Image (cartoon, grey):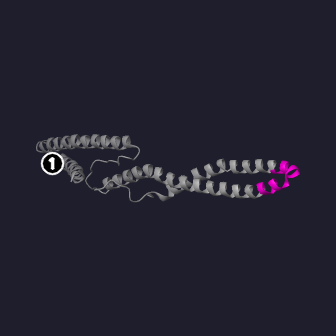
Amino acid sequence: MSNGRKIYLINPGFQIKFSLFVCSLLFLVSIIYPFTIYELMNSIISHLESMLPNIAADYKTRRTQLFIFLILLQLGFTGLTFFICVFFSHKIAGPLYKLQKHLSMIREGQPRGKLFFRSGDYFHEIADDINVTFDYIEENYKKDLMYISEVTSYINNLSLVVPDDKRVVLNEIIVKLNEIQDRFHSKES
């Protein structure tokens, strides 16, 4: 199976919102320089109008062209930043999506495999921590299951020597312990 990315919008709500936030901030901060250049050229043009009107007229035309070019350049840069943000947010959204699917499979009773993320994704330590945690929980399940089995055996033996009125209560306890064991066994399957 290929590890290549086919779909970059795994969590579109988060990824687009994040990308738009970064691009808006970048656009607002960096739009200052085209207006600064525009104002600088206005100062130069007003200074030249009294001494060299022909050059001043040429500068007015160039000022407008330069301003349009800088705005278009800024929009292009913002668009490129948007796609870069989508790509990098994919490396965050992908692992969270995979973790969510992994936990959902466990809740549905499907066999639990190891959680892993793609090599370029972030948060590999979370996958490792989840795997260690579930291994720990499963180990405790096995210990508890063994103990419940022992207790059931002890209660079965005890029910042979107690009076009949107490045996009913012990049988109810045995039924409940067997139900717990069945739930443990169904989780293992």
Residue 147 or 97: which is nearer the viewer?
97
Residue 1, percent across and down?
28, 56
Residue 74 is a magenta residue: no
Secondary structure under badge 1?
helix
Magenta residues, start to end: 45-59
Is 17 positioned to the left or the right of 59 in the image?
A: left
Q: Residues within 10 Å of mark 1 (few under 14, many from 20)?
A: few
**Residue lying at 82% horizontally and 56% vertically, measured from the top left:** 54
Return the residue at label 1: 164
141 lies above or below 18: above
Residue 100 or 81: which is nearer the viewer?
81
Check the image and name the residue furthest to the right.
Answer: 50
Residue 89, percent across and down?
47, 51
**Residue lying at 30% horizontally and 55% vertically, measured from the top left:** 2
Residue 4, percent across and down?
35, 55
Residue 144, percent across and down?
23, 41
**Quadrant holding the C terminus:** bottom left
**Residue lying at 85% horizontally and 51% vertically, measured from the top left:** 52
Is 55 positioned to the left or the right of 84 in the image?
A: right
**Residue lying at 14% horizontally and 43% vertically, measured from the top left:** 153
User: How many numbered markers are drawn?
Assistant: 1
- Looking at the magenta stretch, what is its main secondary structure? helix
Q: Amino acid at mark 1?
A: Asp
Is 54 positioned to the left or the right of 1 in the image?
A: right
Residue 104 or 144: which is nearer the viewer?
104
